[in-house]
Image: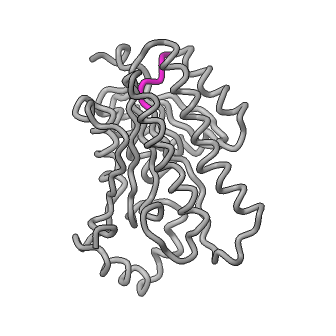
């Protein structure tokens, strides 16, 4: 399948970490990749890496909290080519005791992680349905959507919503051959700023590692490999699934 036949692969939150790894993996597979961040300059390193390797990359701004930003992104990209693959990766984190979470913090996390992701998925799905095209949508959830953890209530609840969004839309859009799956990474070794504080805590990291049967943390590249598989021909019969990429953490 040529790049034109594939259309575009849209990866949100591709400045670093999982999003950057996914964008690079899809570009290696021959996709023209559209990558987003709230500030486009934050995607410069990812775009440069993709282009240096011979891949094709578009960089666009996206604020998932703003409906007009979502609409502008999808409308603009469709002028280039249909978005046949979407990887919902952008999210904000919050580490706070549940009793201390404010309404503003709750609303901010839900608006970015759940509401914005739903409406971006809706916008892409609607375009595919109207055009009679198949497609694949992969949403990066979290192991916090599957098991409980302290100080992660708001984040985990938002990510659990994405799991159910995946299941609901997989059933609703299956007749259009639009597939939806979710990934649930556990602790990752990435360059994400949100990992910096806990990553420097040796006692915390040692405790986390002791809970993982494989004895290692997953990487952004591990998540990217599964995302690339799901949007490729190998995943053509897979929809409505939640795949944990956590070294066995949620199975233990």
Seen from the viewer's position, the closer of residues 239 and 82 is 239
| Residue at screen point 53% across, 77% down | 150
Image: magenta residue range = 81-85
Residue drawn at point x = 63 percent, y = 77 percent: 97
Q: Residue at x 77, y 61 (%)?
A: 104
Q: How many marks?
A: 0
Q: What x and y, as percent, mark residue 119?
A: 61, 36
| In this view, 205 is above or below 118 | below
Magenta stretch: includes residue 246 = no
Q: Position of residue 160 (x, y in %)?
A: 50, 56
**20 in relation to 126, above or below:** below
67 left or right, relative to 55: right
**Residue 60 location in percent, x, y?**
59, 32
Q: Say above or below: 133 vs 163.
A: above
Residue 56 visible here: no
Residue 235 in the image: x percent, y percent?
26, 35
State whether the magenta stretch is mostly helix, strand or loop. Answer: strand
Image quadrant where residue 66 sits:
top right
Q: Quadrant of the N terminus?
A: top left
Q: Specify whether 51 is left or right of 96.
A: left
Q: Quadrant of residue 232?
A: top left
Looking at the image, which residue is at 41% across and 19% down? 7
């Amino acid at each position: 399948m040529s790049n034109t036949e594939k259309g575009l692969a849209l990866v949100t939150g591709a400045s670093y970490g999982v999003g950057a790894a996914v964008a690079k993996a899809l570009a290696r597979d021959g996709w023209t990749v559209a990558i987003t961040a709230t500030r486009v300059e934050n995607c410069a390193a990812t775009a440069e890496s993709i282009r240096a390797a011979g891949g094709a990359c578009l960089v666009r701004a996206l604020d998932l909290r703003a409906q007009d930003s979502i609409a502008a992104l999808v409308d603009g990209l469709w002028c280039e080519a249909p978005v046949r693959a979407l990887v919902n990766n952008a999210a904000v984190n919050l580490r706070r005791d549940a009793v201390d979470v404010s309404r503003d913090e709750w609303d901010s996390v839900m608006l970015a992680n759940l509401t914005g992701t739903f409406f971006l998925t809706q916008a892409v799905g609607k375009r595919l349905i109207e055009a009679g095209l198949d497609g694949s949508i992969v949403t990066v959830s979290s192991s916090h959507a599957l098991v409980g953890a302290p100080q992660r209530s708001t984040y985990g609840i938002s990510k659990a919503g994405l799991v159910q969004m995946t299941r609901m839309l997989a059933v609703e859009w299956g007749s259009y051959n639009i597939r939806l799956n979710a990934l649930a990474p556990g602790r990752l070794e990435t360059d994400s700023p949100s990992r910096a504080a806990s990553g420097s805590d040796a006692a915390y990291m040692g405790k986390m590692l002791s809970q993982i049967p494989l004895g290692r943390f997953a990487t952004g590249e591990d998540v990217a490999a599964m995302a690339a598989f799901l949007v490729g021909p190998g995943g053509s019969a897979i929809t409505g699934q939640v795949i944990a990429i956590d070294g066995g953490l949620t199975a233990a």
